[in-house]
């Protein structure tokens, strides 16, 4: 029964989540207030998981109908008793079929949930390994890195960019991710959305959230160094666009 409850709750959350996210895309897709959009995206998760737990208690004066129900029972109950022997085998077959299909769906859901959480754990292990390598450095340069990215309070930059003339812009961009705790956004979202692993909109959501992170960081760098300088830096770098779900990459 607890398994059925979790699957049902996940479906309810998924429906609310899809409605809210699609509404966000329709209403805010052309909005340039990126901090506001980030706040709305984070709020969508909270609302999606809270709203299905709200129960509406509707009072019904059923005591006024008790005499009518009592009269109906004297007519209905004998009829049901006479039909019980004929309908019982069919009901047993239908019930067993429903139980088997529900059991199968539960197993599929929990298998996907386990795989999703396992992949997240692998990413966290990779994140921890990079954090150990950086030790006490705020900005860590490495020949193993192909593109700049951030994990929590650390900035990781390829060693080839250490002498780059626009190095300060790259570090400022990545440092902004650190100050705004963008990795924490991604970690919480990724963990919570593991319950919705079957929902393609959840992956679209994560992509949108990372896009808002990059937009706010670009806006910060543009304000500090100017738009032309920021665009020149972006165009001068040939970087891989591949990243992991917990990374904020400079691309």
Image (tube, rainbow, N blue to C red):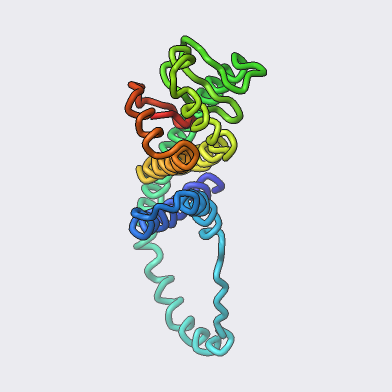
Q: Where on the picture, by quarter, is residue 134?
A: top right
In this view, the residue farthest toward the top is: 143
How many marks overall? 0
From what the image shows, is residue 40 above or below residue 245?
below
Q: 2 or 115, which lies in front?
A: 115
Q: Position of residue 120 (x, y in %)?
A: 50, 29
Image: 82 above or below 250 = below
Percent x, y of residue 29: 35, 53
Say if residue 117 shows up in the picture.
no
Residue shown at 56% from the left, 17% from the top: 140
Place of residue 77 in the rendered image (x, y in percent of width and height, measured from the top left): 46, 76
Left/right placement of residue 149 relative to residue 134 reads left
Q: Residue at x 43, y 39 (%)?
A: 226
Q: Quadrant of the C terminus?
A: top left
Please indicate whether residue 139 sits to the left or right of residue 167 in the image: right
One can see residue 221 in this view: yes
Comparing 142 with 108, the one in front is: 142
Q: Residue at 47% across / 37% down in the picture?
A: 221
Q: Nearer the viewer, residue 51 or 62?
A: 51
Q: Residue at x 44, y 53 (%)?
A: 33
- Residue furthest to the right in view is 136
Q: Could you tell me residue 3's position as x and y percent? A: 52, 44
For this rendering, which residue is in front, 27 or 83? 27
Q: Quadrant of residue 15?
A: bottom left
In this picture, is 179 found above or below 43?
Answer: above
């Amino acid at each position: 029964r607890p398994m059925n409850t979790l699957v049902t709750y996940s479906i309810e959350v998924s429906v609310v989540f899809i409605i809210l996210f699609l509404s966000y895309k329709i209403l805010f897709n052309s909005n340039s207030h990126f901090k506001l959009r980030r706040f709305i995206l984070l709020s969508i998760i909270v609302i999606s998981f809270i709203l299905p737990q709200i129960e509406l208690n509707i009072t019904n004066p059923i005591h006024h109908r008790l005499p009518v129900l009592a009269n109906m029972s004297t007519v209905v109950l004998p009829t049901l008793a006479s039909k019980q022997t004929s309908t019982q085998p069919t009901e047993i077959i239908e019930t067993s079929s429903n139980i088997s299909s529900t059991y199968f769906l539960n197993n599929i859901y929990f298998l996907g949930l386990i795989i999703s959480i396992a992949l997240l754990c692998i990413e966290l292990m990779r994140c921890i390994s990079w954090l150990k390598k950086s030790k006490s450095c705020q900005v860590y340069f490495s020949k193993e890195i192909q593109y700049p990215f951030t994990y929590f309070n650390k900035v990781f930059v390829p060693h080839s960019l250490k002498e780059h003339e626009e190095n300060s812009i790259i570090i400022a961009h990545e440092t902004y991710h650190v100050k705004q705790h963008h990795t924490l956004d991604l970690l919480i979202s990724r963990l919570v959305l593991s319950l919705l692993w079957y929902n393609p909109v959840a992956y679209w959501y994560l992509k949108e959230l990372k896009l808002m992170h990059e937009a706010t960081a670009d806006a910060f760098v543009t304000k500090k160094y100017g738009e032309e300088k920021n665009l020149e830096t972006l165009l001068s770098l040939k970087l891989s666009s591949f990243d992991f779900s917990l990374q904020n990459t400079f691309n």
